[in-house]
Image: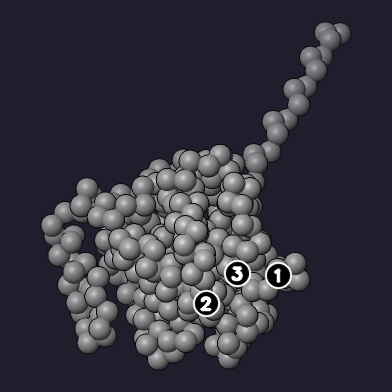
Amino acid sequence: MASQLPLSPPPPPPPPPPKYLQEDDLTQECRDLLTSLPRENGWVNSHLYNYQGFWHTSRLFQGTFSCQKLFQAQDTDILLVTFPKSGTTWLKAILFGLVNRTHYPDTKHHPLLASSPHDLVPFLEQLFADKQVPDLASFSSPRLFSTHSPLPSLPESVGSSKCKMVYLCRNPMDTFVSLWHFTNKLRPEKIGANSLEDVFDRFCRGVSLCGPFWDHVLGYWKESLDKPNKVIFLKYEEMKEEPNLHLGRLAEFLGFPFSPEEEASGLVDEILGLCSFDNLSNLEVNKTGELSTGEEKRAFFRQGEVGDWKNFLTAEMVDRLDRISEQKLKNSGLKF
């Protein structure tokens, strides 16, 4: 008899997709709810779902829904709120450096040099995206969290407590261009990139993560006018132009004002230098590796400039965004 050739071992199974692309690990309650929600094609994941008037991926919907039910805000909590790609990473670093400056007086051995701002100031909805209730006992006071959640989707305890919210907005044109670049970096290579024109139309219709953009911004703008001691509203462009002024405003609002001695010692400039785009983007910890959710850390740093939209948007696109902004923000007092 002819000898049989040994069978080749079966090929190894493909690695699981990163967490941010996973759509199967959902509770049954969330699965049931998703079937009842309006949905549209997503920018990265297969779909976005409309919940309480805003669009979410299935995973972030689960995180938002669980957070609404389970998160108990403390009076000393500080919540950084942004629409996606509005300077979140930069302000996370500034917020951490500001609040913890007495714990880490030596900026040469600072946690920001060894850890991503996203690890130091985590997203609430990502903490709650898994089925298990996150253990928040390790967070020291004041606890620092961030969120992309629109105002109507915040946990009830955030509104009823004395915790403070820092809202950072960016003009819609730079926000859109940054979001387009960022989401294309996250899309699986096999499905290719989104075209600028396709996602521009969706952005204008409000169909983007946590969109509509204008409703998101306007909700927190009005809240900052109604509750100025609870919500501070910052503009990315103004912070880039006068960072010292706005860092001082932020410190006063949070109850961590700079002393005359700190100002004289150059501490304000030291924190801003540590948290600058150039410094953060060139740190090895932000250039290599991935976050726990699977995004490459380097994806969060592109240019950080004001006005980069001029390199991508046509005159017709600019006109459409201007008209939407004028209509949506009319009589609000908010302008870009």
- Contact (Cβ within 8 Å) of mark 3 with mark 2: no
In the rendered structure, which disc, 2 or 1, sits on the residue that comes first in sequence? 1
* In this picture, residue 151 sits left or right of residue 113: left
- The residues bearing labels 2 and 1 have C-alpha atoms spaced at a distance of 16 Å
What residue do we see at 42% from left, 87% from top?
228
- The residues bearing labels 1 and 3 have C-alpha atoms spaced at a distance of 9 Å
Element carrying mark 1: loop
- Contact (Cβ within 8 Å) of mark 1 with mark 3: no
In the picture, the quarter occupied by the N terminus is top right
Q: Residues within 10 Å of mark 3 (few under 14, many from 20)?
A: many
Mark whose residue sits in front, 3 or 2: 2
- Numbered label attached to residue 140: 1
- Numbered label attached to residue 254: 2
Which is more toward the observer, 221 or 28? 221
Mark 3 lies on residue: 144
Q: Amino acid at mark 1?
A: Ser
In the picture, the quarter occupied by the C terminus is bottom left
Q: Quadrant of residue 41?
A: bottom left
What residue do we see at 32% from left, 75% from top?
214
Q: Amino acid at mark 3?
A: Leu
Element carrying mark 3: strand
Q: Where's residue 167, x and y in %?
A: 43, 73
Q: Amino acid at mark 2?
A: Leu
Q: Is residue 96 above or below residue 184?
A: below
* In this picture, residue 145 sits left or right of residue 250: right
